[in-house]
Amino acid sequence: MNALHELKEKFRPIISTYVESDAGQIDVMLGMIRPAGDPKHGDFQANFAMPLGKRAGKPPRDVAQTIVDQADLSAICQNVEIAGPGFINLKLDDDWIKQNLKAALADEKLAVASVAAPRNYIVDYSSPNVAKPMHVGHIRSTVIGDALTRVLNFVGHQAKSDNHLGDWGTQFGMILYGYKHFRDQATFDADPIAELSRLYRLVRKLIDYHGSKAKLPELKSALAELETQLADLKKQQSGTEEKAALKKIKKEVSQVGKRVTDAKEKLEKATTSISSVEGGELAPVAAEHPDIGTAVLLETSKLHAGDTENRDLWTEFLPVCKQDMQTIYDRLSVAFDMELGESFYNDMLGTIVDELEAKGYARQSDGAMCVFLDDFETPMIVRKKDGAFLYSTTDLATIKYRMENFDADACLYVVDHRQHEHFEKLFAVAKMWGYDEAELKHVSFGTVMGKDGKPFQTRSGDTVGLAGLLNEAEKRAGEIAKELNEGISADQLAENARVVGIGSLKYADLSQNRSSDYTFDYEKMLALKGNTAAYLQYGYARVQGILRKVEVDPVPLRSQPVDFEFATDVERALAVQLLRFEEALSDVLIDYKPNLLCNYLFDLGQTFFKFYDQCSLKDTESETLKSSRVQLCDLTARTIKTGLSLLNIGVLDKM
Ligand code: ARG
């Protein structure tokens, strides 16, 4: 049940006569019906009479009145009022609310209706590059993708998750090279995961070292040039008085200033990478492997070309790497419908490039096969000069495969915002190629930042590993659980720490607008107050506590409820908020934003705690009022539990 949706449908036919059935305009107008900011004005407010009045050349109040007279709102609203210049204030009918609460109470799915037009979705998320340790960035893709898949399925779509593993790229060249030159056989036999990630890090470090050394002169001269430019500009600035000219110079100073900072950072990174090797025990190793960068690429292309030794090693390494990731997925309780990594598409790539060429979409340029696109400066390369295929080629194969095998209506790619251009190009090529009906959407997200305002890193400048993050969140949640209840058993403590720790970590991420960067902060994410998982889990546990205390079993009331009573405003407010669950889910899916579900749950939590403060369940005037309140509590807890489960976050009966 979605009150907002029902109100919109009541107004739709009438609005359509004002905007000549222009579907776009109708939706814009209907979008002006919103939850009221102030409960004094009712539950919803419609503001479309102002623009419609302007269009029709009539006073908006008159337009509002005519529309209200025509709309048949009596079943839903008990009060419709026109205020100010033409706002329409809508107050839901109490009987209507009560009837819908009963329906929600009786239904597993809380009376959330299935969508009218279910679609087949593929949600591509997590998708780490295998062989590299997973880091903090992967948590974003994983939890956002997981939540979206759950919400889609809950409202009746068919969503399948696909972990598009990077199991075929350069990082395998790195561990192949590392294994061949630097492996410690004993460690590998005892703990292959640890040894492979050591090898990955070692090779990465050596490549960075040589790369930095080669780039150093260029970086230095670029910085020097920018610094001279900046000094000149500053001189000019001090000699300029005319306002417009001064403004222009100031702008340039700030722009060049930024570039100087960037250049300094790059140089600093390079010098750090160099000094971390030079003078240390790695120095002779680096000297022995001067061409490691090229050699790694060679290992990768040998793997792709079917070289037996490399293929065999790949076959041996892949399960080891996957097992490592699996421990993280298990801890996050994340499972995928499919794990079709890049390697799965390898055999299809040649055919795809041939097809693109035959259809005239791709052509040779400087020896490479490229697709040129109108709106982009650079083409999409689908086969390199040396014959190698690219990330883009695999992604094209993936689209074809998903369309042909799953009849996908939509593919969501939950990937870091830095891949924006890749996806823009990919979708443009897919469209040209004939896959123009499906919705292809880059569900992009920002960076996880540290409290220092820089991308979240360890003290040594490495990206933060996911396993360590989960451990720390659990540890801290455990400490809080111990403080909250002294006599807690060890098992209970471990369970609490897991549910609250991991849940809070996920929620901290999900509650942010995905497009923004967010700051990673253990204290904030685990706080019992504020928009956190712990706050909602606490609300859930409170309800369980109350129900234990009043000794009323809510279960029989679900199918045989008493009539709801609203003895106070806050009971009615809680009821209205409970009925907005479906609206929140449908909001999530407009632009694939799980934070809108978090916002809803947080509002629900706040309304519930107000109710909890003001409404006793023990000393009620009547037994029916008591039962009515028990029903509100039960529905609140179930809505929190269901809402959190759609974010793949658990609840506890006691906290
Ligand atoms: N493996 C890629 C990376 O870590 C992400 C893959 C995203 N999915 C895709 N179909 N391109 O950057």
Image (cartoon, rainbow, N blue to C red):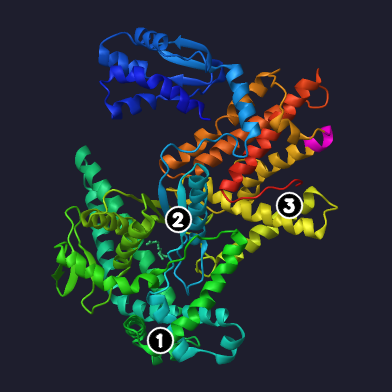
Q: Is residue 427 visible?
A: yes
Q: What residue type is disc 3 on?
A: Ile
Please tell me how crowded label 2 is: few (under 14), some (14-19), or many (20+) other residues with Cα within 10 Å: many
Instruction: Find the magenta span and give its range.
Output: 546-551
Who comes first in sequence, dot 1 or dot 2?
Answer: 1
In the rendered structure, the answer to whether residue 507 lies left or right of residue 72 reads right
Q: In terms of image quarters, where does ligand 1 lie?
A: bottom left
Q: CA distance from mark 2 to mark 3?
A: 28 Å
Q: Secondary structure at mark 1?
A: helix
Q: Is mark 1 within 8 Å of ligand 1?
A: no
Instruction: From the top left corner, tell me how far across and down residue 414 is, in percent.
Output: 42, 55
Instruction: Identify the disc placed on residue 63.
Output: none
Residue 329: give x, y in percent of width and height.
Answer: 57, 63
Q: Circle 2 is placed at which residue position? A: 447
Q: Which residue is mark 1?
A: 310
Mark 3 or mark 1, which is nearer to you?
Answer: 1
Q: Which residue is depicted at the point 14% across and 70% down? A: 365
Asked if labels 3 and 2 touch by Cβ distance under 8 angstroms, the answer is no
Q: Is the residue under label 1 in contact with that under label 3 (CB below 8 Å)?
A: no
Which mark identifies residue 480?
Answer: 3
